[in-house]
Image (tube, rainbow, N blue to C red):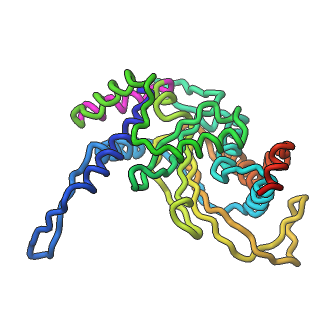
Protein backbone atom coordinates (compact mmCIF):
# COMPACT_ATOMS: atom_id res chain seq x y z
CA UNK A 1 0.00 0.00 0.00
CA UNK A 2 2.98 2.29 0.51
CA UNK A 3 3.38 2.95 -3.19
CA UNK A 4 -0.21 2.93 -4.46
CA UNK A 5 -0.06 6.64 -5.20
CA UNK A 6 3.12 6.15 -7.24
CA UNK A 7 1.56 3.22 -9.11
CA UNK A 8 -1.38 5.45 -9.99
CA UNK A 9 0.94 8.05 -11.52
CA UNK A 10 2.93 5.38 -13.36
CA UNK A 11 -0.24 3.83 -14.84
CA UNK A 12 -1.59 7.25 -15.79
CA UNK A 13 1.66 8.25 -17.51
CA UNK A 14 1.99 5.04 -19.52
CA UNK A 15 -1.65 4.97 -20.57
CA UNK A 16 -1.64 8.63 -21.61
CA UNK A 17 1.46 8.07 -23.72
CA UNK A 18 -0.08 4.98 -25.34
CA UNK A 19 -3.29 6.92 -26.08
CA UNK A 20 -1.31 9.68 -27.79
CA UNK A 21 0.46 7.12 -29.97
CA UNK A 22 -2.77 5.55 -31.20
CA UNK A 23 -4.07 6.85 -34.51
CA UNK A 24 -7.27 8.79 -33.98
CA UNK A 25 -10.15 7.34 -35.94
CA UNK A 26 -12.50 10.17 -36.85
CA UNK A 27 -16.14 9.11 -36.96
CA UNK A 28 -19.25 10.79 -38.29
CA UNK A 29 -22.56 11.36 -36.53
CA UNK A 30 -25.56 13.65 -37.00
CA UNK A 31 -24.10 15.77 -34.18
CA UNK A 32 -20.75 16.19 -35.92
CA UNK A 33 -17.42 14.39 -36.20
CA UNK A 34 -15.83 12.82 -33.15
CA UNK A 35 -13.25 10.28 -31.95
CA UNK A 36 -12.94 8.13 -28.83
CA UNK A 37 -10.15 7.39 -26.38
CA UNK A 38 -10.05 4.75 -23.60
CA UNK A 39 -11.29 5.55 -20.09
CA UNK A 40 -8.10 4.26 -18.47
CA UNK A 41 -7.41 2.51 -15.18
CA UNK A 42 -5.73 5.73 -14.11
CA UNK A 43 -9.03 7.59 -14.52
CA UNK A 44 -10.78 4.85 -12.51
CA UNK A 45 -8.46 5.64 -9.61
CA UNK A 46 -9.21 9.35 -9.91
CA UNK A 47 -12.92 8.53 -9.58
CA UNK A 48 -12.16 6.32 -6.57
CA UNK A 49 -10.27 9.11 -4.79
CA UNK A 50 -13.05 11.59 -5.52
CA UNK A 51 -15.53 9.11 -4.06
CA UNK A 52 -13.48 8.91 -0.85
CA UNK A 53 -13.07 12.69 -0.70
CA UNK A 54 -16.81 13.30 -0.99
CA UNK A 55 -17.40 11.29 2.18
CA UNK A 56 -15.38 13.73 4.31
CA UNK A 57 -17.03 16.70 6.04
CA UNK A 58 -14.85 19.54 4.79
CA UNK A 59 -15.03 23.26 5.43
CA UNK A 60 -13.08 25.65 3.24
CA UNK A 61 -11.22 28.87 3.86
CA UNK A 62 -10.41 30.87 0.75
CA UNK A 63 -8.42 34.08 0.65
CA UNK A 64 -5.36 36.04 -0.37
CA UNK A 65 -2.01 36.31 1.35
CA UNK A 66 0.47 39.11 0.72
CA UNK A 67 3.67 37.28 -0.23
CA UNK A 68 5.62 40.28 -1.51
CA UNK A 69 8.34 39.98 1.09
CA UNK A 70 9.05 36.21 0.83
CA UNK A 71 9.20 36.44 -2.99
CA UNK A 72 11.61 39.37 -2.72
CA UNK A 73 13.70 37.50 -0.14
CA UNK A 74 13.86 34.33 -2.28
CA UNK A 75 15.01 36.48 -5.20
CA UNK A 76 17.72 38.10 -3.05
CA UNK A 77 18.93 34.69 -1.86
CA UNK A 78 19.09 33.49 -5.47
CA UNK A 79 21.39 36.41 -6.31
CA UNK A 80 23.60 35.29 -3.42
CA UNK A 81 23.81 31.74 -4.77
CA UNK A 82 20.99 30.10 -2.78
CA UNK A 83 18.22 28.81 -5.04
CA UNK A 84 14.95 28.03 -3.29
CA UNK A 85 11.56 26.94 -4.55
CA UNK A 86 8.58 29.06 -3.53
CA UNK A 87 6.47 25.88 -3.39
CA UNK A 88 9.07 24.38 -1.04
CA UNK A 89 8.87 27.48 1.12
CA UNK A 90 5.07 27.16 1.41
CA UNK A 91 5.51 23.48 2.30
CA UNK A 92 8.08 24.46 4.95
CA UNK A 93 5.80 27.04 6.60
CA UNK A 94 2.73 24.80 6.40
CA UNK A 95 4.42 21.69 7.83
CA UNK A 96 6.16 23.60 10.65
CA UNK A 97 2.90 25.25 11.69
CA UNK A 98 0.99 21.96 11.58
CA UNK A 99 3.67 20.36 13.79
CA UNK A 100 3.06 23.11 16.37
CA UNK A 101 -0.72 22.54 16.11
CA UNK A 102 -0.92 18.74 15.56
CA UNK A 103 -4.66 18.62 16.34
CA UNK A 104 -5.17 20.12 12.87
CA UNK A 105 -4.23 16.77 11.31
CA UNK A 106 -6.26 14.63 13.71
CA UNK A 107 -7.95 11.56 12.20
CA UNK A 108 -11.07 9.97 13.66
CA UNK A 109 -10.51 6.35 14.63
CA UNK A 110 -13.18 3.85 15.51
CA UNK A 111 -16.10 5.29 17.49
CA UNK A 112 -14.63 7.48 20.23
CA UNK A 113 -10.98 8.10 19.45
CA UNK A 114 -8.86 10.43 17.36
CA UNK A 115 -5.29 9.71 16.30
CA UNK A 116 -2.94 12.70 16.25
CA UNK A 117 0.44 12.19 14.61
CA UNK A 118 3.23 14.48 15.77
CA UNK A 119 5.23 14.28 12.54
CA UNK A 120 3.93 15.86 9.35
CA UNK A 121 4.05 13.79 6.15
CA UNK A 122 3.23 15.98 3.15
CA UNK A 123 1.97 14.63 -0.16
CA UNK A 124 2.78 17.07 -2.98
CA UNK A 125 2.11 16.99 -6.71
CA UNK A 126 4.97 18.00 -9.02
CA UNK A 127 4.66 18.36 -12.78
CA UNK A 128 7.48 16.86 -14.81
CA UNK A 129 8.12 15.98 -18.43
CA UNK A 130 8.00 12.33 -19.47
CA UNK A 131 8.64 11.45 -23.12
CA UNK A 132 7.75 14.95 -24.21
CA UNK A 133 4.52 15.12 -22.22
CA UNK A 134 3.76 17.05 -19.02
CA UNK A 135 2.68 14.59 -16.35
CA UNK A 136 1.75 14.94 -12.64
CA UNK A 137 3.99 13.11 -10.20
CA UNK A 138 3.09 12.60 -6.56
CA UNK A 139 5.89 13.15 -4.02
CA UNK A 140 5.71 12.02 -0.41
CA UNK A 141 7.81 14.18 1.94
CA UNK A 142 8.10 12.27 5.20
CA UNK A 143 8.67 14.33 8.37
CA UNK A 144 8.55 17.56 6.37
CA UNK A 145 8.42 19.53 9.61
CA UNK A 146 12.02 18.49 10.33
CA UNK A 147 13.39 19.48 6.92
CA UNK A 148 14.85 22.80 5.86
CA UNK A 149 13.57 24.85 2.93
CA UNK A 150 16.63 23.79 0.95
CA UNK A 151 16.02 20.09 1.65
CA UNK A 152 12.40 20.35 0.53
CA UNK A 153 13.50 22.31 -2.56
CA UNK A 154 15.97 19.56 -3.47
CA UNK A 155 13.28 16.87 -3.12
CA UNK A 156 10.84 18.73 -5.39
CA UNK A 157 13.43 19.69 -8.00
CA UNK A 158 15.04 16.24 -8.06
CA UNK A 159 11.64 14.69 -8.73
CA UNK A 160 10.85 17.25 -11.43
CA UNK A 161 14.18 16.57 -13.15
CA UNK A 162 13.58 12.82 -13.49
CA UNK A 163 13.09 11.69 -17.08
CA UNK A 164 12.08 8.05 -16.55
CA UNK A 165 8.42 7.03 -16.54
CA UNK A 166 8.79 4.59 -13.64
CA UNK A 167 8.19 6.05 -10.18
CA UNK A 168 8.80 2.70 -8.47
CA UNK A 169 12.34 2.11 -7.26
CA UNK A 170 13.93 -1.34 -7.21
CA UNK A 171 13.54 -1.77 -3.45
CA UNK A 172 9.79 -1.14 -3.73
CA UNK A 173 9.04 -3.61 -6.52
CA UNK A 174 7.34 -6.02 -4.13
CA UNK A 175 5.02 -3.29 -2.87
CA UNK A 176 4.45 -2.15 -6.44
CA UNK A 177 3.15 -5.59 -7.42
CA UNK A 178 0.64 -5.51 -4.56
CA UNK A 179 -0.47 -2.02 -5.53
CA UNK A 180 -0.84 -3.07 -9.16
CA UNK A 181 -3.07 -5.94 -8.06
CA UNK A 182 -5.23 -3.41 -6.23
CA UNK A 183 -5.65 -1.35 -9.40
CA UNK A 184 -6.85 -4.37 -11.38
CA UNK A 185 -9.53 -5.37 -8.86
CA UNK A 186 -13.23 -4.89 -9.71
CA UNK A 187 -14.51 -1.43 -8.80
CA UNK A 188 -16.77 -2.55 -5.91
CA UNK A 189 -13.94 -4.50 -4.28
CA UNK A 190 -11.42 -1.69 -4.84
CA UNK A 191 -13.81 0.84 -3.28
CA UNK A 192 -14.33 -1.48 -0.31
CA UNK A 193 -10.57 -1.73 0.27
CA UNK A 194 -10.13 2.03 -0.11
CA UNK A 195 -12.80 2.63 2.53
CA UNK A 196 -11.03 0.25 4.90
CA UNK A 197 -7.67 1.94 4.29
CA UNK A 198 -9.00 5.44 4.89
CA UNK A 199 -10.83 4.31 8.04
CA UNK A 200 -7.49 3.30 9.56
CA UNK A 201 -5.30 6.33 10.48
CA UNK A 202 -2.10 4.30 10.33
CA UNK A 203 -2.76 2.86 6.87
CA UNK A 204 -3.96 6.25 5.72
CA UNK A 205 -0.71 7.88 6.79
CA UNK A 206 1.29 5.33 4.83
CA UNK A 207 -0.96 5.82 1.83
CA UNK A 208 -1.42 9.61 1.61
CA UNK A 209 0.61 11.07 4.49
CA UNK A 210 -1.01 13.38 7.04
CA UNK A 211 -1.54 16.57 4.99
CA UNK A 212 -1.61 17.48 1.32
CA UNK A 213 -0.57 20.34 -0.95
CA UNK A 214 -1.82 20.95 -4.47
CA UNK A 215 -0.49 23.81 -6.55
CA UNK A 216 -2.40 25.06 -9.58
CA UNK A 217 -0.43 28.30 -9.62
CA UNK A 218 2.43 26.55 -11.43
CA UNK A 219 0.15 25.73 -14.37
CA UNK A 220 -1.44 29.10 -15.04
CA UNK A 221 -0.46 32.72 -14.45
CA UNK A 222 -2.51 35.32 -12.60
CA UNK A 223 -4.70 35.07 -9.55
CA UNK A 224 -7.43 32.62 -8.64
CA UNK A 225 -7.66 29.27 -6.88
CA UNK A 226 -9.89 26.19 -6.81
CA UNK A 227 -11.83 24.08 -4.31
CA UNK A 228 -10.60 20.51 -4.79
CA UNK A 229 -12.25 17.33 -3.51
CA UNK A 230 -9.42 16.39 -1.18
CA UNK A 231 -9.03 13.05 0.58
CA UNK A 232 -6.68 14.40 3.26
CA UNK A 233 -8.17 15.73 6.51
CA UNK A 234 -6.08 18.87 6.09
CA UNK A 235 -4.76 20.21 2.81
CA UNK A 236 -4.09 23.45 0.99
CA UNK A 237 -4.55 24.38 -2.62
CA UNK A 238 -2.01 26.98 -3.74
CA UNK A 239 -3.46 29.18 -6.44
CA UNK A 240 -1.97 31.89 -8.61
CA UNK A 241 -0.14 35.08 -7.67
CA UNK A 242 -1.73 38.36 -8.66
CA UNK A 243 0.16 41.67 -8.66
CA UNK A 244 -1.88 44.75 -7.86
CA UNK A 245 -1.66 47.98 -5.81
CA UNK A 246 -1.83 47.59 -2.05
CA UNK A 247 -1.02 49.33 1.20
CA UNK A 248 2.44 49.02 2.69
CA UNK A 249 2.48 46.95 5.88
CA UNK A 250 4.86 48.14 8.59
CA UNK A 251 7.16 45.84 10.56
CA UNK A 252 4.82 46.01 13.57
CA UNK A 253 1.96 44.72 11.41
CA UNK A 254 0.15 48.03 11.08
CA UNK A 255 -1.11 49.16 7.67
CA UNK A 256 0.38 52.37 6.29
CA UNK A 257 -2.61 53.93 4.52
CA UNK A 258 -0.44 56.71 3.11
CA UNK A 259 1.58 54.45 0.83
CA UNK A 260 0.18 52.39 -2.03
CA UNK A 261 2.71 50.22 -3.83
CA UNK A 262 2.65 47.09 -6.06
CA UNK A 263 2.09 43.97 -3.98
CA UNK A 264 2.03 40.23 -4.77
CA UNK A 265 -1.06 38.40 -3.51
CA UNK A 266 -1.19 34.61 -3.36
CA UNK A 267 -4.59 32.95 -3.64
CA UNK A 268 -5.02 29.92 -1.40
CA UNK A 269 -7.70 27.45 -0.34
CA UNK A 270 -7.54 25.58 2.97
CA UNK A 271 -9.47 22.29 3.25
CA UNK A 272 -10.23 21.27 6.85
CA UNK A 273 -12.14 18.27 8.15
CA UNK A 274 -14.77 19.71 10.51
CA UNK A 275 -15.26 16.27 12.05
CA UNK A 276 -12.02 16.50 14.02
CA UNK A 277 -11.40 20.23 14.52
CA UNK A 278 -13.59 23.19 15.44
CA UNK A 279 -13.82 26.65 13.89
CA UNK A 280 -11.99 28.70 16.55
CA UNK A 281 -8.73 26.65 16.61
CA UNK A 282 -8.88 26.47 12.82
CA UNK A 283 -9.12 30.26 12.57
CA UNK A 284 -6.13 30.68 14.89
CA UNK A 285 -4.11 28.16 12.89
CA UNK A 286 -4.92 29.88 9.59
CA UNK A 287 -4.01 33.27 11.05
CA UNK A 288 -0.57 31.96 12.02
CA UNK A 289 0.05 30.43 8.58
CA UNK A 290 -1.06 33.64 6.90
CA UNK A 291 1.16 35.83 9.06
CA UNK A 292 4.20 33.58 8.68
CA UNK A 293 3.88 33.56 4.90
CA UNK A 294 3.50 37.33 4.86
CA UNK A 295 6.53 37.92 7.08
CA UNK A 296 8.81 35.44 5.30
CA UNK A 297 9.07 33.03 8.23
CA UNK A 298 12.43 31.25 8.23
CA UNK A 299 13.95 33.10 5.26
CA UNK A 300 15.85 35.70 7.28
CA UNK A 301 17.76 32.91 9.02
CA UNK A 302 19.25 31.60 5.78
CA UNK A 303 22.78 32.82 5.17
CA UNK A 304 24.89 31.95 2.11
CA UNK A 305 28.09 30.01 2.67
CA UNK A 306 31.45 31.20 1.37
CA UNK A 307 31.19 28.70 -1.48
CA UNK A 308 27.76 29.99 -2.48
CA UNK A 309 28.94 33.61 -2.29
CA UNK A 310 31.91 32.81 -4.53
CA UNK A 311 29.72 30.95 -7.04
CA UNK A 312 27.24 33.86 -7.13
CA UNK A 313 30.03 36.33 -7.92
CA UNK A 314 31.32 34.13 -10.73
CA UNK A 315 27.88 33.92 -12.35
Residue in the picture at 52% in, 48% down: 126
**Visible residue check, residue 295:** no
Quadrant of the drawing holding the C terminus: bottom right
Residue in the picture at 63% in, 47% down: 279
Q: Splitting the image into 4 quarters, where does residue 29 fall?
A: bottom left
**Visible residue check, residue 279:** yes
Q: Is residue 193 magenta?
A: yes
Q: Which residues are magenta?
A: 188-202
| Residue 74 at x, y percent in the picture | 75, 55
Q: Splitting the image into 4 quarters, where does residue 116 fall?
A: top right
Main SS type for the magenta part?
helix
Q: Nearer the viewer, residue 220 or 187?
A: 220
How many labels, in total?
0
Q: Nearer the viewer, residue 185 or 273?
A: 185
Q: Is residue 137 above or below residue 248?
A: above
| Residue 213 at x, y percent in the picture | 56, 47
Q: Is residue 105 left or right of residue 305?
A: left
Q: Is residue 88 left or right of residue 173?
A: right
Quadrant of the drawing holding the N terminus: top left
- The residue most toward the front is 314
Q: Nearer the viewer, residue 82 or 147?
A: 82
Q: Is residue 315 above or below residue 98?
A: below
| Residue 138 at x, y percent in the picture | 48, 42
Q: Is residue 279 magenta?
A: no
Q: Is residue 313 left or right of residue 122?
A: right
Residue in the picture at 65% in, 47% down: 88
| Residue 47 at x, y percent in the picture | 32, 46
Residue in the picture at 73% in, 35% down: 100
Amino acid sequence: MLVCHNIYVNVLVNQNIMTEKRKREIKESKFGTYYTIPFTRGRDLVVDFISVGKKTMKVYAIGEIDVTYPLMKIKELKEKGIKLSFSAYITYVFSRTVAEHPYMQAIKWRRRKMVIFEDVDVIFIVEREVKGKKMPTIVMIRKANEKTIQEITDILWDTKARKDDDMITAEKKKGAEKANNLINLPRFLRRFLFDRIFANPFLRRQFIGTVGITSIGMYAGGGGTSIPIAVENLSINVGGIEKRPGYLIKENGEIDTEQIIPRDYLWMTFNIDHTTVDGAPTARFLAIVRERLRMGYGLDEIKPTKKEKKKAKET
